Image: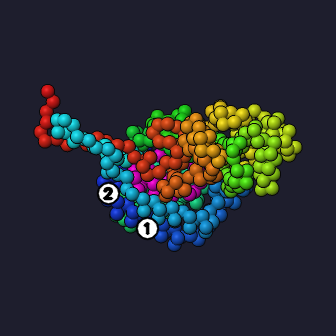
Amino acid sequence: MHEMGAEARKAFGVLSQSSTESKNKAILAAARLIGEREDAILEANAKDMAAAKDKGLTGAMLDRLELTPERLAGIRDSLQQIADLKDPVGDVIAGWDRPNGLKIERVRTPLGVIGVVYESRPNVTVDAGALCLKSGNAVILRGGSESINSSVALHGCLADGLEEAGLPAAAVNYVNTTDRAAVGAMLSGLDGNLDVIIPRGGKSLVARVQDEARIPVIGHLDGLVHVYVDENADLEKAAKIIVNAKMRRTGICGAAEKLLVDKAIADKAVPELTTALTEAGCALRGDDASRSLDDRVTPAETEDWVTEYLAPVITVGVVDGVEGAIKHIAAHSSGHTESIITEDQATADRFIHGVDSAIVMHNASTQFADGGEFGMGAEIGIATGRIHARGPVGVEQLTTFKYVVRGTGQTRT
C-alpha cells in the first residue's frame, strides 16, 4: 500500500501537468475498451453477483452491484460526457489588478492524490477514476469485497487507457485486496502521499473514515431524503413525482425516504398519494395523522424518521405547512436532498431558502440528485458537508486553487 502511495504521488506529478487532449484520450480509450471487453466484465460481475446472493446481500446492494449491457453502455456514455467537459485545471476563477500594478488571479489546480473508499458499486470504479483523471488528480480506489471481480475488470480498462495515451497507469490505482487493513492504511495517509479521502457507502464505512482518517475527508452521509407536498400542490403532479422519487430505483441515495404532507390538504392528499405508492409496490409507515387517513399505513417508530431504507418503504408524516416541513427536515435530515411540490412560487422560495441541504428541489423527483443528471458527466458521490465540496462531486469539486501574482518589479515598503 505504501509503495502504491509513492507511485501515485509520482504519477500525479505527471498527470497534473498533462494536456487536456492526453487526459481525454485516456478516458475515451477506457470507454472503447469497456465495450470491447464487455463479455469479460459481465462474466466477472456474474461471479460477484453469485457470491453476493450466497452472502444474503439485500436487494438494494444487489441492485448497486449488478452490471448489465445497458448499464455498461451508460458507463461508456458517462466517460464520453466526462471527456466532453471543460477541463477545470488552469481555469481562472477570478482576477483583479491592485493599485500598485500587481495582477492577481485565482486559478484552479488539482487536489493531488485522492483516496476513494466505496462498497458494492463497480460503476464508482470508472466514475471516480475518470473524474480524478480529468481533473488532474491521481487516485487510489478501494472498492468493496463484493465487487472486487467487477472492479478489477473495469479498472484494467482505465489503466490500459492511460497507457494508450502515454500517461502513467499508476495515476488510477485499484487496491486489489479484500483485506480491511488496506482501508486503515489509506486512512493513515500513506506516508503523506494521500491528500484527501472520499468515502462512499453505508453508515459504518463513513463513520469509520470520519473517525480514523488523518487526512481531510469529503463526506457522503445517508440519503434521508424528504419530499414535502404543500397545500398548493397539483396532486396529480405530486403523485407522479413521489412515486418516481421513491420507486424508480429504491437503492440509490437520491431515493425519497420520507413523505411530508401539509395538514391543510391531508384529508385529500394522503389517501391519493399513499394509494399511488401502494399501487407501485411501496410499503407505508407513518404518524398518527397519516394512519387515521389510510389504514394501510403502519405505525412509524422513532427510528423510522432517521432510517435510509434503500427499499420500497416510505415514512409518511403530516406537518403544519411549509414552516412545519422545514422544522421537521432540520430535525431529521442528513442534509442530502429535499424537494417541495407546490404551484406557489413564494412557498417554494421559502422552502428553498429555509432548508439547509446540499440539494433542494422544486417540483422535481429527487432521483435527479446525481452528477450525471446535473450535466457533470458523473460523480464520486453527493457531499453532505460544507467543506470543501457540497452536493455532487465532479471535476470542479476535485480541484482547489492557488493565487498567481504577476508583477513588473514591485517591492513592498
Amino acid beneath label 1: Ala
Left or right of residue 58: residue 413: left
Left or right of residue 230: residue 106: left
Measure how far apart labels 1 and 2 are at the Cα level. Answer: 16 Å
Q: Position of residue 31 (x, y in %)?
A: 48, 66
The one of 198 and 262 positioned closer to us in this rendering: 262
Residue 259: say if magenta: no
The one of 337 and 40 positioned closer to us in this rendering: 337
Q: Quadrant of residue 209?
A: top right
Q: How many marks?
A: 2
The residue at 50%/42% (across/down) is 390
Residue assigned mark 1: 29
Q: Position of residue 354 (x, y in %)?
A: 58, 35
The image shows residue 46, relative to residue 105, as above or below, that is below
Amino acid beneath label 2: Ser
Q: Residues within 10 Å of mark 1 (few under 14, many from 20)?
A: many
Q: Position of residue 195 (x, y in %)?
A: 41, 41
Q: Secondary structure at mark 2?
A: loop
Can see residue 318?
no
The residue at 34%/46% (across/down) is 93
The one of 50 and 388 positioned closer to us in this rendering: 388
Q: Which residues are magenta?
A: 115-139
Q: Secondary structure at mark 1?
A: helix
Residue lying furthest right: 295
Residue assigned mark 2: 18
